[in-house]
Amino acid sequence: MDARTRYFRQVRRLRRSARRWSVLAGTFGGASAVLVPYHGLGWPDAIWAALTGGTAALTFWRWSDLRELAAQPAPEPVDPARAAALTRARIGAVLARLPGGAGALAELRRVQGRARIRGSSVVPAWERLDRAAQTLVGLAGRLGGPAESAVLEAATAER
């Protein structure tokens, strides 16, 4: 969620909260105004008066929070391309943590790279390079000695 969406969501939430506390303060104030003269002053009236005062204080507090937040300028909208890149990166990170997800992402990127150059004159060279890279990955676990370190270095460089 970007900062602009978070800002407007917080403004809506504070406005709803301020309205709710205003209604409660009005309800308790009205109940106090009706019940105090009806029964006279007693301990239940002290409870109504305390509820009225508490909700009035919370109402004031919520409305002042809302005014303070609304006085701040809203954040600028996020560039759609940047938002899409962030979303893609988040989804890729989630998929990479799943079993087999890293391999699926690598295959997806390989296919995307192939689709980008489709129809150009470099396709045969790209196919040879891609086949060699897949062969290198397949040989990585079988080689030993000095070739093993070279394959590991090539694999880390490829990533």
Image: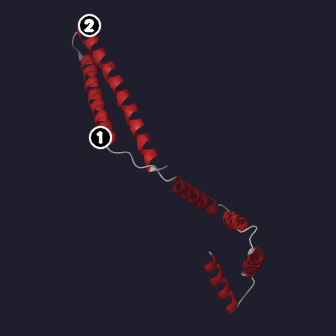
The answer to which quarter of the image holds residue 13 is: top left
Residue 82 rendering spot, x and y as whole percentages:
52, 57
Q: How many numbered marks does the figure carry?
A: 2
Residue at point 21% right, 13% down? 41
**Mark 2 Cα within 10 Å, few/some/many (few <14, many 20+)?**
few
**SS class, disc 2:** helix
The answer to which quarter of the image holds residue 56 is: top left
Residue at point 76% right, 68% down? 119
Q: In this rendering, would 127 be left or right of 109? A: right
Q: Residue furthest top?
A: 38
The residue pinned by badge 1 equals 68
Residue at point 73% right, 79% down? 129
Q: Nearer the viewer, residue 115 or 142?
A: 115
**Mark 1 Cα within 10 Å, few/some/many (few <14, many 20+)?**
few
Disc on the earlier residue, 1 or 2: 2
Q: CA distance from mark 1 to mark 2?
A: 40 Å
Task: Inspect the image, locate mark 1, and give the three-letter code of the amino acid beneath it.
Answer: Glu
Q: Which of the numbered marks, if any, corresponds to residue 101?
A: none
**SS class, disc 1:** helix
Q: Is residue 111 above or below residue 131?
A: above
Task: Inspect the image, locate mark 2, and give the three-letter code of the amino acid beneath it.
Answer: Tyr
Q: In this rendering, would 141 be left or right of 58? A: right
Q: Which of the numbered marks, if any, corresponds to residue 38?
A: 2
Residue at point 75% right, 78% down? 125
Residue 70 rendering spot, x and y as whole percentages:
33, 39
Q: Is residue 83 above or below residue 100?
A: above
The answer to which quarter of the image holds residue 29 is: top left
